[in-house]
Image: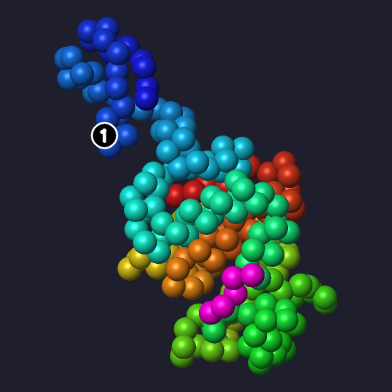
Amino acid sequence: METRKCLNCGAMLELSKSKTSLECPYCGSKFDIETETKEKIAQNANDFNEEMFRVERDFTADRAKKQTGRCIDNLLYCMNELGTSEKIENHIRKNLTNGDLAAEGINDSLINNVKGRIDSEAEPGEHIIVYKDLGIFSKGKEFVVVTEKRLLFFTKKNCKSILFKDIDTLRLNDSGDYSAWYINGDIDKRIPSMEPSGQLTGAVVALACLKSFEQDPGRERIRLI
């Protein structure tokens, strides 16, 4: 809670319920919160590592939702408890149970069906961590691939990719309580909902963030919005 003094009566100010302003409990005066203070409040409310993230959204309401909440909770678990991309990758492999998901040695047939397309975009020997079909009618046509270097987004005709170190912003879209994370404001580059529980989605987001800092340790913080 903020403890600044009211400019009108000198009483101690309190954080408003909306967390967007400071209010005086005595005279009712309200004062805007500076951007830096808003970020700190959001950071503390959501348990995100302030050295890695610039949090510009209060995720409290999102965490109250069933699927999205599990996504965010597992994101935080992977970042704060597991702490390395290697441990997160192992965590993901242990939980790959959905039929639309695959990895090297797990549901190989999904990857083998589109290996030519993946090989045409990835570097030789690039390790596939997760393969995800984007729907029952898009099998082998629209899918996302997570490697140790990047994310690749395949549509019917095209492919876009982004190195982890180039991730500047992640925006949560939880339409219908199925969370997806849009990268750098590009709707064609998103980490989709991986499975019904949402937990693996959070793990993949955490993996992307940690690998981003492994690729560029001196980079700017990732914005969460």
| Residue at 36% over, 61% down | 66
Relative vertical location of residue 7 with respect to residue 43 in this rendering, above or below: above
Q: Is residue 114 magenta?
A: no
Q: Quadrant of residue 87?
A: bottom right
User: Is the magenta region chiefly helix, strand or loop?
Assistant: loop
Relative vertical location of residue 173 with respect to residue 220 in this rendering, above or below: below
**Segment colored magenta:** 94-98
Relative vertical location of residue 107 with respect to residue 163 in this rendering, above or below: below
For disc 1, the neighbor class at 10 Å (few under 14, some 14 to 19, many from 20) is few
Q: Amino acid at mark 1?
A: Lys
Query: Which residue matches tag 1?
Result: 17
Q: Where is residue 124 drawn, in percent x and y?
A: 83, 77
Name the residue at the left extreme.
27
Indicate left or right for 54 with 177 as reference. right
Indicate left or right for 85 with 193 as reference. right
Instruction: Choose between 186 and 8: the one closer to the eye.
Output: 8
| Residue at 66% over, 59% down | 88
Q: Where is residue 110 drawn, in percent x and y?
A: 63, 88
Indicate left or right for 158 with 46 as reference. right
Would residue 114 be seen by someone viewing this image from the given angle? no
Q: Secondary structure at mark 1?
A: loop
**Number of residue marks:** 1
| Residue at 29% over, 22% down | 14
Relative vertical location of residue 100 with respect to residue 171 in this rendering, above or below: below
Instruction: Choose between 51 and 168: the one closer to the eye.
Output: 51
Q: Quadrant of residue 172?
A: bottom left
